[in-house]
Each structure stands twice: as structure tokens, then as C-alpha cells.
Image (cartoon, rainbow, N blue to C red):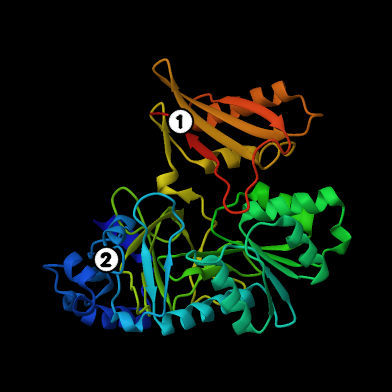
Amino acid sequence: MTVLNDRKKTAMQMQPAQFEAIAKQLATLKDRSPFYAKKFDGIDLTDVKTQADFEKLPFTDKADLREAYPLGLAAVPQEEVVRIHSSSGTTGTPVIIPYTKKDVDDWAIQFARCYEYAGVTPADRVQITPGYGLWTAGIGFQAGCELLGAMAVPMGPGNTEKQLQFMVDMESTVLTATASYALLLAEEIERRGIQDKIKLRKLITGSERAGEKIRKRITDALGVEYYDIYGLTEVYGPGIGINCQHTHAMHVWSDFVYLEIIDPQTGEVLPDGEWGEIVLTTLQKEGAPLIRFRTHDLSRIVPGECACGHNEHPRLDTLTGRSDDMMKIHGVNVFPAHVEEILQEFPELSSEYQIRISHLDGRDTMRIYIEAPGTLDWAKTATAVAARMKSKIGFTPLVKIVETGFLPRSEKKTKRVYDERD
């Protein structure tokens, strides 16, 4: 019992203003939202008087949100809904998130703050390549840019030829993109030898995790400062947090979101510094408030103070992946981050890889394809990588080295894991 109490003392403490916002939300939530009236049936939300009480509330998951399709999540009259967005998943029932005018404005405020933390000013020209439409990315990047007062260049995804033309002609200084598309653009700029015509000074990526190797590949090619933005459609969209100029960890806006880290298996709230699953609660959202939403993103709260001085906003470490990205092979739990960590030990290899899992002759097999230049001894390197994988994860995958550029590039997110088992 003493150990548990000591662990609890080191966990993230809810700020008084955060608890006040949550209590205000809970006071009328079941009356405003049929979704939560059903979810919290039998629970008196006015009994939530402390952080410990709050941590006893059940989690919300994406499966819950799908059941509310199309507009069952709305906690306001439908005439107050000014916009909808939908998560970017391609399978299953879509999750529709309704936004009020205040939600839209609050999202822009958060996004403008992200730009400010990255050192973007009204003098900058921001080239926006994430997608528009039901996906939250592009329109969020644009709203924050315009609120800040910078020039938005709203390209959207694809058409790399025009992207590069506008990047040169408009003298864009900030690029926003998925890490995958930033890599594709960086490689194309190198191939064309037009680095001296590019004025980029900052890159802001989101939507997918990027290991240190791909970050270095991009920054070396473009000569930019690299910033990671955090967010998800269910909780406004990208823009609820970003790393500052002093750290790779991402500040999460504590006046809009309450952050918890839990053990994915037990649901126990973990102390600061321990790795687990991110759980988010919205503090001001009107259209579709979320209570203890399991994101399945894996990270930790970085303990201690940040050199930027904004210690009111807790910091999330670089995401290691998602709990639902886990692959179970030969009884071993494997994440793509494990592969990326090992690739980091081989500077001669590219950042690009692909994992394929199949079942053959009664046995699961993992094949890893990794890019490398043709001057490398591919057979020797593949053997070394396989041996390192064996020592780290407990079994030996089949490693195949391929020519740089062989693996597909993406204008959105790069799919790296293909599970071909029945």
C-alpha cells in the first residue's frame, strides 16, 4: 500500500482550474448528451469531488464513438453545430465529431499557439500540405496560421511538381506535412539539386510518429528546425500540443486538455516518467466533449521543468507508437519502434523500412525490408541487423536490404507494417 501511495504522489496532479472545468462539464453532461447519459448510466457525476473520484470514471474508446454515428456525440442542439470532421481511418464505421463556433475558434487559438512555440511569426509564409475536407489537418493548420497573421499557402496534399514550384516562387519559410511527405519532398529537392532555391527554415509535422533517423534525414536535406505537433480528430485535431525550441517533448495545452498516462493493460494511472497510453479529457469542448478518451498513442509525461518556462503545460515525450500497432510473433510483443531503434544503430542504412508478417508451414515469419545504398555489403549488413534484432526482441527476422528509393513513398502516412496472416 505504501508503494502505491508513493507512486500516486508522483503522478500528474490535476490543476484546480482543470478540475473546475471538468466539474462544470460533468454537472450537465448527461442532460446534454444522450451518448453520455447512456455511458454513465447509474453513475452520479456530481459525486466526482476529487481527482481520485475522476480516475474511477470509465474510459471512452473509439468503439464507443463509432456507435454514436452519425451525430450521436453531439452535446449541443444541432443548430449550434457549424462543422463536422471525421477521423482518417479507412475501415469501420466513421467517427463524426461535431464542432460549435467556439470549438472552431478554440482550435485556431491552440494552433496559433503551436506556431508561436515553434518560432513562427507573421513574417513567415506557411506551405500547408496536409489534406483538407473531413480530415482535420489542413484546415487546422490554415486557421492557426491566419490567426497568427502569417501567410497561408494552402496547397493540400500531392502534386509534388506544383508543391516545389510554389515553395520556390512563394519563398515559403515554413512547411507543414506528414513526416512521410516531408521526406518525399526532401528527396525530390535533393534529386533536382534546388536546395539553394528553397527558403524553408522550419518544418512542422504531425499525424504519424517519426523516428530519429527519418527526422535527421529530413533536417539534413532541408536545413530546417523540426517540430512535432500533436492532436487527433476526436480531440479538436492536430494542434493541442507541440514541442518548443528547447526540447523534443511536446507541450500539451493544459487549459484545453487534461492529460493522463495509463497502463494499457490495467488502466491504472501511471506516475510521471513512466511509459503508457495517453488518455485525454477535453476541458472546454462544446460540440463533442470527451471524458477520459483512450487515444492508444504511447508516450510518457516528461517530469521536471522545461527551459522555455511554460511549465503549466505538461510535456509528452516523442510517441513510440500505438498500443494497437503491436505485433505478436512467436509469443513476443513487437512494435515498429523496436525496428527504428535498431536502424538508428546502423548509420549506413536509410530511415525507410517495411515489415511483412506471414504464416508459413505452421510458423509466423517476420520479413524486414530496409533501404541502403548499392555500395554497401548488403548480405553482411542484413546479417548484422538480424542478429541485433535477435538480441533485442528474442527471435531472428528475415532481413532483406533493398536499393534506396525501392520502398514506396507517401503523400500522406507511410504504411510500414503488412500483416499477411489469415
Q: CA distance from mark 2 to mark 1?
A: 39 Å
- Residue 338 at x, y percent in the picture: 53, 40
Q: What residue do we see at 33% from left, 59% from top? A: 269
- Can the viewer see residue 229? yes
**Residue at disc 1, secondary structure:** loop
**Residue at disc 2, secondary structure:** loop
Direction left: furthest residue:
42
Q: What residue do we see at 57% from left, 51% from top? A: 413
The circle on residue 26 is: none
Q: Indicate the amino acid at tag 1.
A: Glu
* Along the viewing direction, whichever of 140 and 299 lies nearer the viewer: 140
Q: What residue do we see at 59% from left, 54% from top? A: 412
- Can the viewer see residue 309? no
Which residue has dot 2 on it? 55
Q: Indicate the amino acid at tag 2.
A: Glu
* The N terminus, quarter of image: bottom left
* The C terminus, quarter of image: top left
- Residue 137 at x, y percent in the picture: 54, 66
Mark positioned earlier in the residue sequence (2 or 1): 2
The label nearer to you, 2 versus 1, is: 1
Q: Say whether marks 2 and 1 touch (CB < 8 Å).
A: no
* Along the viewing direction, whichever of 392 and 58 lies nearer the viewer: 58
Which residue has dot 1 on it? 420
The image shows residue 143, relative to residue 302, as above or below, that is below
